[in-house]
């Protein structure tokens, strides 16, 4: 029987019971030779050979893979104002309508989309402050409110970071 394990440096260490417990240290360069030797020695048990092949392939992937699998993003902070509500209402109702989470979410999405294709909301940093204006005509005494200085962080995928398109940031 041959027992193998992989340490944190991706080196494979095997112990061969048939050879009197001799320990074999296998470096990165000798990985394929060791895998082929182990497969040949274990051909008597096909189930064990499949497991060993699977572990060997995982070890090879771990060795040859890059260290960063995460997608990289480009971030941009924007400050903008929302539009006033379409109708006139009492000041407290108009401020509540302008400050609804639904409005903040939708306007934040629009703010990021004005930056171009692929920009999305990362976070809303500041909801801004409500500013009201008097309505004229039959609605005198009522107000229309909007939010000023809403700060939104937008993000998009950095070109070339996911291996699809080579590019520069």
Image (cartoon, rainbow, N blue to C red):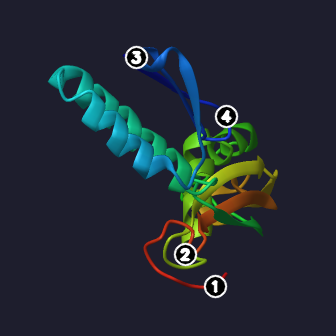
Q: Which quarter of the figure has residue 29?
A: bottom right
Q: Residues within 10 Å of mark 1 (few under 14, many from 20)?
A: few
When the figure is inspected, residue 35 is found, relative to residue 50, above or below; the finding is: below
Q: Front-most of 122 and 6?
A: 6
Query: Which of pointers 4 and 2 indicates the residue nearer the eye?
Result: 4
The CA span between labels 3 and 1 is 55 Å
Whether residues under marks 3 and 1 lie with C-beta atoms below 8 angstroms apart, the answer is no
Where does the C terminus fall, quadrant-wise?
Answer: bottom right
Q: In this rendering, does residue 128 appear at all?
A: yes
According to the picture, the residue beneath numbered tag 3 turns out to be 18
User: Does 56 appear above or below 165?
Assistant: above
Q: Is residue 61 visible?
A: no
Q: Which mark is residue 168?
A: 1
Location of residue 69 in the rendering, given as x and y in whole percent from the top left corner: 56, 53
Question: Mark 2 and mark 3: span between their CA atoms?
Answer: 50 Å
Q: Which residue is mark 2?
A: 160
Instruction: Name the residue: 52% across, 45% down.
Output: 62
User: Which residue is tagged 4?
Assistant: 8
| Mark 1 and mark 4: Cα distance apart in space | 33 Å
Label whose residue precedes the other's in the sequence (2 or 3)? 3
Does dot 3 land on a helix, a strand or a loop? helix
Badge nearest the viewer, 1 or 4: 4
- Residue sticking out furthest to the front: 20
C-alpha distance separating marks 3 and 4: 27 Å
Q: State the SS at label 4.
A: loop
For the point 61% across and 77% down, the residue is: 115
Which of disc 1 and disc 3 is earlier in sequence? 3
């Amino acid at each position: 029987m041959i027992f193998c394990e992989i340490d944190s440096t991706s080196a494979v260490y095997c112990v061969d019971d048939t050879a009197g417990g001799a320990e074999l240290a296998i470096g990165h360069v000798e990985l394929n030779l060791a895998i082929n030797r182990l497969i040949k020695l274990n051909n008597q048990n096909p189930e064990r050979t499949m497991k060993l092949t699977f572990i060997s392939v995982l070890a090879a992937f771990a060795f040859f893979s890059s260290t960063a699998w995460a997608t990289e993003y480009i971030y941009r902070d924007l400050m903008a104002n929302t539009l006033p509500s379409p109708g006139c209402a009492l000041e407290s109702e108009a401020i509540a309508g302008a400050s609804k989470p639904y409005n903040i979410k939708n306007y934040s999405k629009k703010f990021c989309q004005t930056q171009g294709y692929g920009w999305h909301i990362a976070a809303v940093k500041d909801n801004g402050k409500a500013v009201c204006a008097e309505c004229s005509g039959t609605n005198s005494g009522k107000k229309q409110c909007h939010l000023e200085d809403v700060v939104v962080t937008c993000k998009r995928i950095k070109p070339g970071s996911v291996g699809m398109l080579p590019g520069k940031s």
